[in-house]
Image (cartoon, coloured by chain):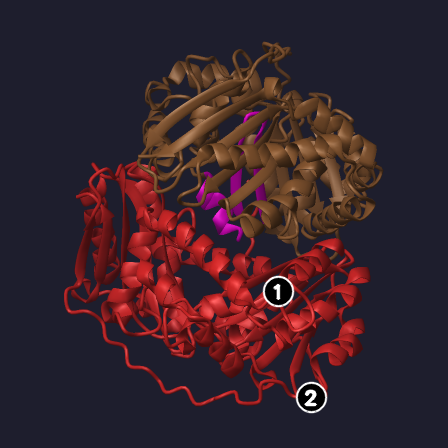
Chain colours: A brown, B red
Amino acid sequence: MIEFDKLILDNGLKIIVHKDSSTPIIAMNILYNVGARDEDPEKTGFAHLFEHLMFGGSRNIPQYDIAINRAGGEYNAFTNNDITNYYLTLPQQSIETAFWLESDRMDDLAFSSDSLKTQRNVVVEEYKQSYLNQPYGNVWLLLRPLAYLVHPYQWPTIGKNISHIENAVMKDVKDFYRKYYCPDNAIMTIAGNIETSEVEKLARKWFEPIKKTKDYKRELSKEPVQISHRKLEITSKVPFDAIYIVFHMCKRSDPEFQTVDLISDILSQGTSSRFYQQLIKENQLFSEINAYITGELDEGLFVISGKLMKGISMQDGESAIWQQLENLKNTLVDDKELQKVKNKIETLLAFSSMRALNNAMNLSFYELLGDASMLNLEVSRYLDITREDIREQSNKILNENNCSTLYYLAE
Amino acid sequence: MPEVKTPDIRGINLNEPALFRLDNGIPVYIIDSGKQDLIRLELIFNAGYYVQSAPLQALTSGMMMKEGTSNYSSKEIAETVDHYGTYFETLIDQDTSCLCLYSLFKNLENVLPVLKEVVRNPVFPEEELSVFIAKNKQQFIIHSKKVEYQAKVNFNSNIFGYDHPYGRKADLKDFDLLNRDQIIDFYKTNYSSSNCKIFISGKSATDTLSLLNTHFGGDHWNINYDTNHNAIRQNPVTEKKQLIHKEDALQSAVRIGKPLFNKLHPDYSGLRVLMTILGGYFGSRLMTNIREDKGYTYGIGSGMVSLLNGGYMFISTETGIEHTSNTLKEIYYELDKLREEFVSPEELDLVKNYMLGEMLHNFDGPFDQADRYRSVVDYGLDFKYYRKSIDDIQKIEIYDLKQLAEKYLDPGSFYEVIAGKL
């Protein structure tokens, strides 16, 4: 049970406080409700590029990194298709430094053109390092537009094209900041050995003067229901054939989300899982194969990705995967197997609440989902799932008409 | 602006773990703290690459222990581990093998009988071995295509020597040469009760002692453990610069460094401060110059690596092929600068605060504390080592750093590997 208090400033900033007296570290997490899905289709990769610029200095703090390192702190951030999340940790006594740093850049970013120029190059190098210079690295650049025809999930967070990043200009940066980086579009969580009253005092001092900006309403194109199978085949300089199969699934906040997550666990969580035992060990069709979900806020994807053993045909690998999926649809999973994946989740959730920083991140995220208290209901939502739920969702999702397949062939 | 405060080092939890011994003498280090009902159990053996006689021997032996025992099949072991919701992994590195289990407290007693079998009675079935080798061979081939991997393994070979166990790299043919007898032999000589340490950390860890004694105490096992490993001489290559050309590379992986010593050496702490200034944190000189000013890379860092029988320092990055030669130039420029100019007192203060803050983080919670203890105990050290490190960080001055730089950062002494394109 993660206990917390919640308050909202007049400017709309939501604040969550989790007291943890076991740690000498204070963690602060600020989630901005903006991600790659909010981007202009002609200017993709922007939310992530912007995350880099947030470290380029603000009105009173020319160098964010020096200010925080001097206080003995650490920091980082990540962007995905839904959110941009900043976090830092500091020795408890320097907690006010966190409020100072984060309020200054929420209020007034410096917009240095040098910073924009450099960070464009840095992100281009990141693009190469993570997507282009790795075997199979570009797979999500191919899969997303195959699976999504209209929804902005059709491009990855890094951007659909390297030129979108190279062409970013200062006007885009400023517009983006004004639209999304405002107190009423953020959720801040503080975790550590601190009382809510002290957080409130600091928050009023540092964040309350920041003005609320004009509300915006997110209006994204809804992905139409897929009605027939899609297929893409590419040949590349990789050592082995690989197959990727993706299915549309529900939103993160839908009640069936946890069931779909457990379906992916039955298939590939741990070495006793069905994929591992049958496709890797018994039949030796794949050297690695996984099933997982993207877990995005809007309707996400259920993903299967496998690398075939040399000499195994794509057709044999693919039909073995489908046979596993048909089993889930036709036969009820037995109680013991269902209990197993629930037990794994229970351990995993305990693990994820070991650290103050993780709790801070999770509380912000669940607040975005609707209510931070949902974090404490997560275990029971998994434990309540029945064998019938698994079969029902398998039948709903794991169909050829709802599916896109990528053959990634070795040259 | 709030007042900048030096991290309060009294917050660093340096309470030594409690030490118990099982009936057969195996030491158990206990860190009993935490709020979640989660336990981490680690069985640690000095059974890393250093003591292997052929490439892949240590790795395969360690990873295969869970693939079948006298009383359980590979599948039964996997079923039990997963059924109780536990996460089990085997981690092999240069010096050690660690069998690591995460479990809710309530499930630990149910999974320990299987873990005992894995540790004490593995049988290494031939058919399991062939599946393991085929699968890992493919993953090795994929891995070998990555420039970062190429730079790293070749760098290790160059600084330690191709025949040194820290430097010897695995080849594709090594997968075919590996046989079951070598795997069994490695297991029998290294996974002995007299070569075992146990770390248990998490809430109520102390309450597991009698369980641990039941499963891992009692009789000695694998008593033919050989403690006499001869020190193997390092034999670095003579050609210090190596280019591994990859025609279609978009980025080059760069690794620069030199063989040094481990944490027992008196200069180790000071050099760690110097390496932090150079590339050990986000605002470091290499990051500021090569990423934040020039935009040549997504990331660049430097660090010290301490091994039981040696050590080294390294700088590593991946950089666009059009920026590779400029990146090299800037790296050597930063090394020269550390040798030729004093670090400013402000920069040193900042790095001291950063490093002390890092110590606070690194001892935060039972698992982190166990990690810190684990990384000194094999050197015959305990948490007093960290007390001294803190003291060393606080006391070091700009003059000391310049001396260290002059002594160790001679550009002629560096090894350089580039995988990609120049």
Q: Report the label total.
A: 2
User: Against A364, is A271 above or below?
Assistant: below
What's under tag 2, amino acid-wise? Answer: Asp
| B268 relative to B112 in the view: left or right | left
Which element is circle 1 on? strand
Q: Gap between marks 1 and 2, in whole Å?
A: 22 Å
User: Against A92, is B362 above or below?
Assistant: below
Q: Which residue is mark 1?
A: B100
Q: Nearer the viewer, residue A291 or A118?
A: A291
- Crowd band around label 1 with a 10 angstrom C-alpha radius: few (<14), some (14–19), many (20+): many
Is A77 a magenta residue? yes
Please report contact status of discs 1 and 2: CB closer than 8 Å, yes or no. no
| B417 relative to B56 in the view: left or right | left
Percent x, y of residue B192: 57, 83
Q: Quadrant of the C terminus of chain A?
A: top left
Is A263 a magenta residue? no
- Crowd band around label 2 with a 10 angstrom C-alpha radius: few (<14), some (14–19), many (20+): few
Q: Which residues are magenta?
A: A64-89
Q: Quadrant of residue B340?
A: bottom left
User: Against A370, is B204 above or below?
Assistant: below
Q: Which residue is mark 2?
A: B219
Tell me, for residue A235, which label it has, or none: none
Which element is circle 2 on? loop
